[in-house]
């Protein structure tokens, strides 16, 4: 899942970003109100952590402009000021939660999981591709009755592949969506991570493979029908 952190205190933003990446989220950060609003309006995020006191545009203004434009991304407001009137103002403008500084990372992470669950009660928290299940809350995968632990980048890569199952994805497309800007185009890191994923999610005998290599192009996550999977047992 992709999270946007809009926080002008870089140490706080770094603390949140590092913690969420350890929890296997993909995290981007903005350090002022104008760039935060631009990123929120022009990109798809699963949730936004939004500071109230920001240069350029304050958090309340950003939230109002987002909601006025129809952007329904869940928002958790962060503030050093815990006055009741401010909490009410933020919630009335469409915030999903409100957390006063200082806070523990454990509480922030728990509140984030809560608003992610509440934001789409009709949508399952589990993604499926054939007999592989990816839990978007725990960030574990399950196949052959086994729980598969993933690193943050392995999870991000697998989530992107499943969201685009049966589509051929070029290496550059994968790079743009999973590694974003911190990537050397000459690197073979995508192939390395694909190999790691295969070693974790594929069967030992190589049957029922889910990730296909498309020569000269990239990769495809194949949604193998269950009946076909059963035939290959």
Image (cartoon, rainbow, N blue to C red):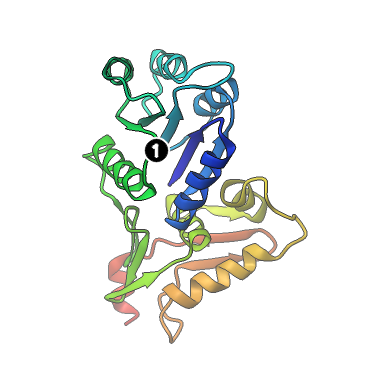
Q: Is residue 147 found left or right of 182 in the rendered image? A: left
Numbered disc 1: secondary structure: loop
The answer to whether any part of residue 164 appears in the image is no
The answer to whether any part of residue 40 appears in the image is yes
Quarter-wise, where is residue 14 in the image?
top right
Residue at 67% of width from left, 45% of height from top?
A: 181
Q: Picture coordinates of residue 58 (x, y %)?
A: 49, 17
In the displayed structure, 28 sits above or below 135; it is: above
In the displayed structure, 230 sits above or below 141; it is: below
Residue at 41% of width from left, 80% of height from top?
A: 203
Total numbered badges shown on the rendered structure:
1
Front-most of residues 199 and 12:
12
Quarter-wise, where is residue 217 in the image?
bottom right
Front-most of residues 51 and 140:
51
> Disc 1 marks which residue?
102
Residue at 47% of width from left, 18% of height from top?
A: 62
Q: Picture coordinates of residue 65 (x, y %)?
A: 45, 14
Q: Residue furthest bottom?
A: 205
- Which quadrant holds the C terminus? bottom left
Q: Picture coordinates of residue 195 (x, y %)?
A: 57, 73
Q: Residue furthest right?
A: 186
């Amino acid at each position: 899942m992709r999270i946007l952190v809009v926080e002008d205190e870089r140490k706080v933003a770094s603390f949140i970003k590092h913690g969420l990446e350890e929890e296997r989220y993909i995290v981007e950060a903005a350090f002022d109100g104008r760039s935060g609003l631009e990123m929120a309006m022009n990109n798809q995020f699963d949730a936004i952590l939004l500071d109230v006191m920001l240069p350029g545009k304050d958090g309340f203004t950003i939230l109002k402009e987002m909601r006025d434009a129809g952007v329904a991304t869940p928002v958790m407001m962060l503030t050093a000021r815990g006055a009741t009137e401010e909490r009410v103002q933020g919630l009335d403008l469409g915030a999903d939660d409100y957390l006063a500084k200082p806070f523990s990372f454990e509480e922030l992470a728990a509140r984030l999981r809560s608003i992610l669950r509440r934001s789409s009660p009709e949508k399952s928290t589990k993604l499926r591709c054939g007999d592989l299940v990816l839990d978007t809350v725990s960030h574990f995968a399950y196949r052959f009755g086994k729980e598969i632990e993933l690193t943050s980048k392995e999870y991000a890569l697998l989530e992107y592949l499943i969201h685009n199952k049966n589509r051929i994805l070029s290496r550059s497309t994968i790079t743009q969506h999973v590694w974003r800007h911190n990537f050397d185009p000459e690197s073979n890191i995508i192939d390395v991570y694909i190999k790691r994923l295969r070693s974790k999610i594929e069967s030992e005998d190589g049957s029922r493979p889910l990730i296909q290599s498309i020569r000269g192009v990239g990769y495809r996550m194949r949604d193998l029908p269950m009946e076909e999977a059963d035939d290959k047992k």
